[in-house]
């Protein structure tokens, strides 16, 4: 019986969860390192330049984590030195991919600069806003968010598979980007189903935990104030770890017939 696109998407989610459960503590640590490097450090005062550096090295770090998932999937254990040795063979095209992402991000920022300036100029003030001003601000905010998502979509499609295609298949930069775009377009339905299932699943879990914390908070208010930030941070760690597992599972399925270059 032929597998439908929806069935494939659900299977990807199940396989991603199964792979995450092999060593959840390790994947959570990888997710924590990723968040610190790419979210926390660039946001610190006087370290804003790290944001530019992080974009350039992002494909290397992403490929590193995904290749660790692959080792565990195929061998049952991981060997970071072996993965790093393989990444070194393809370090230049991975960094070029990161540099390309940086150029795209700069161009996107330039294109959105006027919209951002308009949004800031209509931001709420201490004096308050009239109903018409608030409506205008919300419309501008929604328009800005839509434009950001539309500009990020091509980058997302071009980079979902390309780091693995460079590191595992030895593809040159342009071939990796074109193959990533082709793979994403060909498997749009299972990718969409997987994202929808994971998003709904995470929301259900968050709502359930939030309800429990709310009940505890009614009894012990200080406990709710302590647990809620921890819940949000833990959810962020799990989401990141699952995304890496999902990247590997979808790559393995989409490019299962492609030759792979081993270190």
Image (cartoon, rainbow, N blue to C red):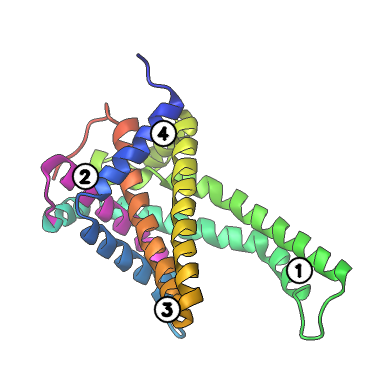
Q: Quadrant of the C terminus?
A: top left
- Look at 26% across and 54% down and name the residue there: 65
Q: Residue furthest top?
A: 1
**Separation of marks 4 and 3 at Cα, in angstroms:** 38 Å
SS assignment at label 3: helix
Question: Label 1, on which residue?
Answer: 118
Please tell me in which quadrant of the rendered image residue 145 appears: bottom right
First in residue order: circle 4 vs circle 3:
4
**Separation of marks 4 and 1 at Cα, in angstroms:** 40 Å
First in residue order: circle 4 vs circle 1:
4
Q: Residues within 10 Å of mark 3 (few under 14, many from 20)?
A: some
First in residue order: circle 1 vs circle 3:
1
Q: Residues within 10 Å of mark 4 (few under 14, many from 20)?
A: many
Say whether residue 71 is magenta: yes
**Residue 2, percent from left and from top:** 37, 16
**Residue 93, percent from left and from top:** 32, 50
Question: Label 2, on which residue?
Answer: 70
Q: Residues within 10 Å of mark 1 (few under 14, many from 20)?
A: some
Q: Are marks 3 and 2 in contact (CB under 8 Å)?
A: no
């Amino acid at each position: 019986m032929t597998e439908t696109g929806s069935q494939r998407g659900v299977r990807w989610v199940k396989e991603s969860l199964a792979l995450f459960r092999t060593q959840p503590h390790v994947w959570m640590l990888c997710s924590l390192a990723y968040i610190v490097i790419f979210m926390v450090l660039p946001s610190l005062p006087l370290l804003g330049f790290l944001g530019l550096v992080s974009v350039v090295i992002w494909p290397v770090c992403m490929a590193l984590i995904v290749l660790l998932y692959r080792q565990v999937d195929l061998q049952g254990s991981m060997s970071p030195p072996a993965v790093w040795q393989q990444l070194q063979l393809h370090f230049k095209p991975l960094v070029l991919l990161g540099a390309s992402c940086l150029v795209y991000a700069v161009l996107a920022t330039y294109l959105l600069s006027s919209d951002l300036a308009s949004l800031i100029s209509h931001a709420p003030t201490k004096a308050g806003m009239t109903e018409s001003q608030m409506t205008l601000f919300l419309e501008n905010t929604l328009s800005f968010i839509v434009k950001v998502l539309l500009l990020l979509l091509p980058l997302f499609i071009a980079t979902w598979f390309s780091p693995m295609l460079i590191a595992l298949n030895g593809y040159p930069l342009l071939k990796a980007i074109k193959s990533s775009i082709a793979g994403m377009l060909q498997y749009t339905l299972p990718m969409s189903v997987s994202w929808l299932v994971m998003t709904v699943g995470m929301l259900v879990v968050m709502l359930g935990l939030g309800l429990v914390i709310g009940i505890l908070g009614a009894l012990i208010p200080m406990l709710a104030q302590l647990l809620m930030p921890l819940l949000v941070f833990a959810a962020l760690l799990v989401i990141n770890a699952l995304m890496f597992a999902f990247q590997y599972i979808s790559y393995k399925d989409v490019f299962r017939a492609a030759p792979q270059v081993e270190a």
